[in-house]
Image (cartoon, rainbow, N blue to C red):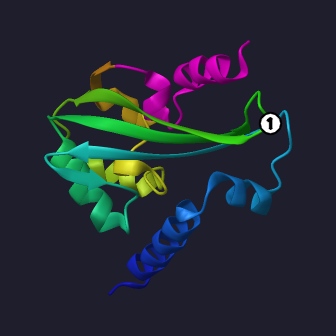
Amino acid sequence: MRTKQLAALIRLRRLQRFQRRRPAQRCSQVGLQPNEVIIGADTVVAYNGEILGKPLDDADAERMLLALSGNTHFVYTGVTLLYYDKAGQISQLSFAEKTEVHFADISIDDIRRYISTGNHRDKAGSYAIQDEFSVHVTGINGDYNNVVGFPVSRLYKELKAILKI
């Protein structure tokens, strides 16, 4: 198994163990105080039954971008909020936001040029909609900020509901 894959698997296992704990246990470990909210989020790209996370290397990024070229895919961001509710109990709220993204046909030269910038690194699906790769996006249905990596509008709506503001 590749070193990066092994490291990712170890992080996943640690996260799964952490998530199995009750919200109160998690909050005490990270020091949640009343009138504070802990926000955790991660974004993935889904295409043709495959979850495309962050690329392992440049070849993986090229594979992902070639697959997405000329096609429609979905960007999902999962968000979890930990907070004290009105009764003083620690509560958890989780939600996911989904955005549909359409790509033009992208030449292999354009894909390799983009990869050479390094901007694909640490990006779900190997691209950032907010940088020069945006010229290949022909449309989206949903929240642009979700594709950037965080659904700000949905977070605002959820915070208003739980904080009663």
Magenta region, main secondary structure? helix
What amino acid does circle 1 point to?
Answer: Gly
Q: Position of residue 118 (x, y in %)?
A: 47, 56
- The vertical placement of 120 against 97, above or below, is below
Q: Along the horizontal axis of the image, is 64 left or right of 10?
A: left
What quarter of the picture does the N terminus occupy?
bottom left
Residue 115 lies in quadrant:
bottom left
What quarter of the picture does the C terminus occupy?
top right
Q: Position of residue 52 (x, y in %)?
A: 30, 53
Residue 9 lies in quadrant:
bottom left
Residue under label 1: 88
Closer to the camera, 52 or 26?
A: 26
In the rendered image, the residue lying farthest to the top is 165
- The span picked out in magenta is 142-165
Residue at (47% x, 57% y) in the render: 121
Residue at (53% x, 63% y) in the render: 20
